[in-house]
Image (spheres, rainbow, N blue to C red):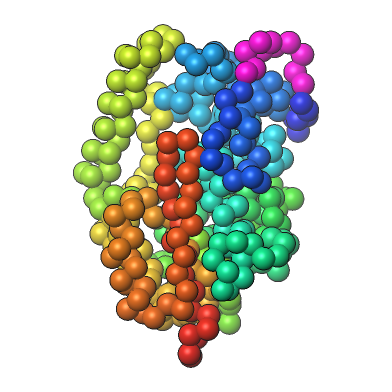
């Protein structure tokens, strides 16, 4: 197992100037930027991808899928001692700081009082008594792995794709320090969020989800095309180092990760309807919502099912804006 220490001789030398991650949660381990010397000490294979960027700080080429994977492996190893994580071929490569950010905001939600907005009233709950249902955990199993290490929570991760389930199960088995707190279950129906994967007597402190963005394969492909064009445009203006092989672009993702019938809006609307059918299943039902324009129709859907409390947890780091939609039926008569 690699030794993850905060030193690595003079391999990178003056290149190790950090770029802080603006707007990240106070508990996010990556808010002060990446210490590439420490990361290379933890994951020596990362060294080949590390170089100065146009801003005078140390970074990698985020268009290079292998570089991004190596960085993610180093971040998980150094911050969470998850040394054997790897990505399924063709699957999305999740940004570790953003996935951690999601979990920290959910932890604050659990710590907040039922009538006190988003302000934590007590300590963040930790340990295996906190059960979390991760809907669409994906092959990376990234939320359960980080959440089990960061907070000691217990996770059930559900996934429609059989191959992704097998890969995620292998990742869990490769990390015995958390394997007893993570279970992967295959969801038999792409139209269901809860039915078929949870038992009648089960309950969770919260459910979480990062739903597919797009409504079709064509829409997903168009989104990837725009990302490619934006990246090439930045390179042509910024004078990035060297030519880039388009085959190495960091644009992956499979059908269930990128698109589903109805896209994000349709998926979350189904989740809201199905949550109302099992209101006591989760203390909080939550999901990421990538598009702010989706909030008004989703708010209407939550009013229609008589959710007792609805909250929008805003997340902003750098220029990226996102939000978590959370609702509960606690306090509603019959819930």
Badge count: 0
Q: Quadrant of residue 192?
A: bottom left
61 vs 152: above or below: above
Residue 9 locus on image (x, y percent): 77, 13
* Residue furthest to the bottom: 334
Magenta stretch secondary structure, dominant: loop
Q: Quadrant of residue 293?
A: bottom left
User: Residue 176 vs residue 190: left or right?
Assistant: right
151 vs 51: above or below: below
Image quarter hosting the N terminus: top right
User: Residue 279 vs residue 74: left or right?
Assistant: left
Whether residue 117 appears in magenta in the rendering, the answer is no
140 vs 206: above or below: above
Along the line of sight, which residue is nearer the eye, 318 or 209? 318
Whether residue 10 appears in magenta in the rendering, the answer is yes
From where the camera sits, is residue 197 visible?
no
Residue in the image at 48% along x and 90% along y: 333
- Report the span colored magenta: 7-17
User: Residue 216 vs residue 248: left or right?
Assistant: left
Residue 142 locus on image (x, y percent): 56, 48
* Residue furthest to the left: 218
From where the camera sits, is residue 315 visible?
yes
Q: Quadrant of residue 129?
A: bottom right
Residue in the image at 33% along x and 51% along y: 291
Residue 252 locus on image (x, y percent): 38, 37
Residue in the image at 61% along x and 70% along y: 113
Along the line of sight, which residue is nearer the eye, 95 or 105? 105
Residue in the image at 37% along x and 33% along y: 251
């Amino acid at each position: 197992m690699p030794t993850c220490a905060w030193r690595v001789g003079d391999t990178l030398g003056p290149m190790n100037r950090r770029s802080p991650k603006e707007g990240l949660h106070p508990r996010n381990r990556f808010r002060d930027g990446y210490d590439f010397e420490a990361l290379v000490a933890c994951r020596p294979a990362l060294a080949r991808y590390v170089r100065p960027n146009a801003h005078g700080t140390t970074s990698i080429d985020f268009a290079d899928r292998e570089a991004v994977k190596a960085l993610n492996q180093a971040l998980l190893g150094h911050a969470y001692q998850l040394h054997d994580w790897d990505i399924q071929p063709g699957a999305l490569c999740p940004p570790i700081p953003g996935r951690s950010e999601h979990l920290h905001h959910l932890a604050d939600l659990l710590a907040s009082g039922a009538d006190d907005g988003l302000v934590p009233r007590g300590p963040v709950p930790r340990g295996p008594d906190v059960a979390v249902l991760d809907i669409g955990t994906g092959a990376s199993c990234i939320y359960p792995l980080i959440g089990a290490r960061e907070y000691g929570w217990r996770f059930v991760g559900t996934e429609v794709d059989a191959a992704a389930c097998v890969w995620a199960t292998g990742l869990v088995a490769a990390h015995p320090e958390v394997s007893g707190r993570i279970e992967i279950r295959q969801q038999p129906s792409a139209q269901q969020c809860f039915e078929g994967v949870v038992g009648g007597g089960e309950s969770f402190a919260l459910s979480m989800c990062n739903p597919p963005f797009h409504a079709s394969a064509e829409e997903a492909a168009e989104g990837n095309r725009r990302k490619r064009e934006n990246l090439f445009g930045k390179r042509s203006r910024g004078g990035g180092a060297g030519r880039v092989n388009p085959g190495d672009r960091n644009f992956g993702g499979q059908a269930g990760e990128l698109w589903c019938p109805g896209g994000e809006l349709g998926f979350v609307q189904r989740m809201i309807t199905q949550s109302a059918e099992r209101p006591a299943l989760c203390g909080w039902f939550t999901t990421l919502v990538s598009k702010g324009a989706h909030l008004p129709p989703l708010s209407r859907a939550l009013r229609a099912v008589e959710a007792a409390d609805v909250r929008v947890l805003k997340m902003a780091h750098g220029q990226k804006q996102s939000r978590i939609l959370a609702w509960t039926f606690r306090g509603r008569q019959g819930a």
